[in-house]
Image: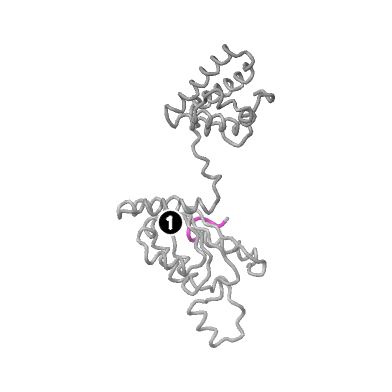
C-alpha cells in the first residue's frame, strides 16, 4: 500500500464523503480500512464487517461507481477518487479472503479467563448422569492426577467410584496421618499403571502402629526411616504398574530427604510394584 495515500480523516477534513454522497455504511468501512492500514485492526476483522450484511458490500460497490462518475465529470478529483477506489478494492479483497482455518487463538486469552471457560464447559458437559460418568472416566483415564497429600487422595478414592475404577496415572506427596488407608484403597484401583510418589521429611512424621509401639519401650531409637513410615506396608501391596517414579517434593531444601533414600525407595517400589528386577 502506498504510504502517500490520503487517510480517511484527511478526506474527512476535505468534506469529501459528504460532497461525494457516500453512505453511512461506506464511511464506516472506510474508517475501519484506515484502522487496518495503521495496524489497529486485523484483516479478517475488516472482512467480517463487510460480510455482516449484503448492504455493507453494496455500499462499497456503490462508492466505486460514484467515484468513477465523479472522475469523469471532475478531473480535479481524480487523485482523491483513486485513493477511495483503491481502499474499496482492498476492503472487498479482505471480505473475499478465505476464513482462517486455524481457529480462535484460545491460548492467547488470560489464564484466569481460560479457567472460567473450563469451569463453564465442565458444568455444561456433566449435566446428565451418563455424560458426567463418561466424561470423568475419560478424564481419569487420560490424565495424571496430582494430590497434595495422602489425606486428599484417601478422601477422593473413598467418595468417588469413577475415580477408583478409572484412575490410571497419579502423583501424590506421601505425607499425612491417613497414608495407610489411602494406599490401601489405591491398591484396589485395577486400572492404575503409572505412579509418581513424592517424598519429604514429613513422610516419616507419621509412623506405623508397630513403630509407635516400639518407641514406647525403646526411647533411644533413631529417627524413623522411610521403611517405617505410615503406609509403607499398604504401598508395597500395589501391583500391576507399568512405571514407578520416586521424586523429591518441590520446596525448600530443608524439607528434602537424601538422594540415597529416594533412589533406594524407587528401587524397592519398582521391584515390588512392577514385578521387575532391581535396576
**Element assignment for label 1:** loop
Rendered residue at 40%/66% (across/down): 185
Vertical side of 171 occupied by 150: above or below:
below
Q: Nearer the viewer, residue 126 or 178?
A: 126
Decide if residue 172 is on the left or right side of residue 257: left
Residue at the top extreme, as displayed: 72
Q: Nearer the viewer, residue 59 or 168?
A: 59
Task: Tell me where residue 37 sits by quadrant.
Answer: top right
Rendered residue at 52%/79% (across/down): 211
Q: Nearer the viewer, residue 96 or 50?
A: 50
Q: Nearer the viewer, residue 33 or 23?
A: 23
Decide if residue 166 is on the left or right side of residue 128: right
Q: Quadrant of the C terminus?
A: bottom right
Residue 128 percent across, percent down from the top left: 30, 53
Residue at numbered disc 1: 192
Q: Quadrant of the N terminus?
A: top right
For the magenta stretch, what is the residue range?
A: 272-278
Vertical side of 278 occupied by 150: above or below:
below
Residue 246 percent across, percent down from the top left: 56, 60
Magenta stretch: includes residue 46:
no
Task: Tell me where residue 129 sits by quadrant.
Answer: bottom left
Q: How many marks?
A: 1
Vertical side of 79 occupied by 207: above or below:
below
How crowded is the residue under tag 1: few (<14 C-alpha within 10 Å), some, or many (20+)?
Answer: many
Residue 213 percent across, percent down from the top left: 50, 84
Decide if residue 148 is on the left or right side of residue 155: right
Amino acid at each position: 500500500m502506498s504510504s502517500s495515500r490520503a487517510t480517511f480523516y484527511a478526506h474527512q477534513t476535505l468534506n469529501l464523503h459528504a460532497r461525494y454522497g457516500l453512505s453511512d455504511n461506506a464511511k464506516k468501512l472506510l474508517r475501519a480500512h484506515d484502522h487496518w492500514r495503521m495496524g489497529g485492526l486485523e484483516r479478517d476483522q475488516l472482512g467480517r464487517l463487510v460480510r455482516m450484511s449484503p448492504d455493507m458490500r453494496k455500499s462499497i460497490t456503490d462508492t466505486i461507481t460514484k467515484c468513477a462518475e465523479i472522475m469523469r465529470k471532475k478531473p480535479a478529483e481524480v487523485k482523491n477518487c483513486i485513493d477511495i477506489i483503491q481502499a474499496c478494492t482492498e476492503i472487498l479483497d479482505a471480505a473475499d479472503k478465505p476464513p482462517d482455518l486455524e481457529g480462535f487463538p484460545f491460548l492467547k486469552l488470560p489464564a484466569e479467563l481460560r479457567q472460567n471457560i473450563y469451569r463453564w464447559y465442565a458444568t455444561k458437559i456433566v449435566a446428565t448422569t451418563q455424560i458426567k460418568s463418561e466424561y470423568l472416566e475419560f478424564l481419569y483415564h487420560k490424565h495424571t492426577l496430582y494430590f497434595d497429600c495422602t489425606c486428599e487422595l484417601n478422601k477422593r478414592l473413598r467418595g468417588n467410584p469413577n475415580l477408583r475404577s478409572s484412575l490410571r496415572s497419579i502423583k501424590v506427596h506421601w505425607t499425612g496421618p491417613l497414608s495407610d488407608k489411602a494406599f490401601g484403597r489405591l491398591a484396589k484401583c485395577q486400572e492404575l499403571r503409572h505412579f509418581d510418589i513424592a517424598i519429604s521429611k514429613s513422610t516419616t512424621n507419621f509412623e506405623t502402629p508397630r513403630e509407635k509401639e516400639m518407641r514406647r519401650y525403646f526411647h533411644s531409637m533413631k529417627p524413623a526411616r522411610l521403611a517405617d513410615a505410615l503406609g509403607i506396608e499398604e504401598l508395597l501391596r500395589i501391583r500391576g504398574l507399568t512405571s514407578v517414579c520416586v521424586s523429591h517434593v518441590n520446596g525448600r531444601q530443608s524439607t528434602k530427604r537424601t538422594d540415597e533414600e529416594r533412589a533406594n525407595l524407587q528401587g524397592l517400589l519398582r521391584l515390588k510394584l512392577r514385578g521387575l528386577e532391581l535396576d
